Image (cartoon, helix red, strand yellow):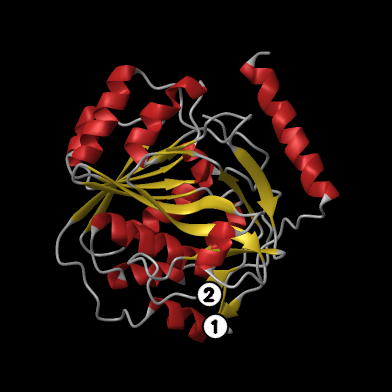
Amino acid sequence: MKQSIIWPLLFLAGLLSAQRKNISSQPNDPIPKSEVMKLTGEFNDAKLKEDVHILWLYGPEDHRGGEHDYIRIKELFVPMLKAIPRITVDEAYQFPTQKQFDQADLLIQYLHLPDLTDKQFAMYQKFVDGGGAVVSLHESCIMRPVGRAEKLAGCIGGSWKGNKTSKWSKFDHAHSIYLNTEHAAFKGLPNSIKLNDESYWNLLKKENVEVIGAIAPTGTKDFNAALKHPEVRSDTFWTYTSGKGRVFGTTTGHYTYTFHDPTYRVLLLRGIAWALNINPAPLMPLAIQSITDEKDLVGTKDAMMNYKNRKL
């Protein structure tokens, strides 16, 4: 069956499954700024000690509006990142040039990757092994044809192995994301968080991958218990090292509203800082930027499902 036919069928199957399970497609309620600050810590006087050049990799939107809004999320985060002193941001569509790799300290990817050539994979692997940092969001871990999954996993640590092995599902507050708070990326954060989103699991993972976030039924004791739970959906967050490079990955981030959730932003900002091996404090203003109202509530009530995609 052609890929162009398979994807709509898979999407419909997932949509029907979500409807049967009454999975919520809605954002968390906004929370007081004071609660967010408990997660961010004090950041008013925090400054980067050196310049950071970020490369944001995006692609054409491939779902209905409010899901996989690769262009919209790029347009949300790039200006915010640029506003942080000593950060510059470049953009790449579908795959960077060698010049862009050479200039980047960090690659943030949020897209469905095209079928990369061996030369492109070699460029990517060289960037990571040479000390490049990567943050991989949601579907960026999926590579088709799946025979190329091993090469993608070499670059980012984990990759989709195919529909017979890897799994995907939406989830709501009946399941929580349990965090390994012993890991430097999440140290000091809550034991678990709740979202209404989607994740993948049973990924092909390289040896140097450390899973630091897993989904399990709400009420599970902690991260270690979540990993042992019979219903665990692992690979929710992971870190990976290859050569001199550091990668932070997550299979969450399906919905646009998720990127407007302050707690989720804290996780991403902590991941960015870990990948760059820097203090996260200078990045933390972004946890509340553009999503704080006049009552100092942070987040959104807008499910954003009426967005219109823009395919380039």
Direction from residue 4 to residue 296 in the image, left or right = left
* Residue ID for mark 2: 292
- Residue 296: assigned label: 1
- Crowding around mark 1 (Cα neighbors within 10 Å: few <14, some 14 to 19, many 20+) is some
How far apart, in angstroms, are the residues tagged by discs 1 and 2? 6 Å
Circle 1/circle 2 CB separation < 8 Å: yes
Q: Quadrant of residue 268?
A: bottom left
Q: Amino acid at mark 2?
A: Thr
Residue 303 screen position, x and y as percent: 69, 58
Picture layout, residue 10 above or below residue 42 = above
Disc 2 secondary structure class: loop
Picture layout, residue 13 above or below residue 6 = below
Residue 94 screen position, x and y as percent: 41, 30
Point 77% across, 35% down: residue: 13
Residue 113 screen position, x and y as percent: 46, 30
Camera-side residue: 90 or 215?
215
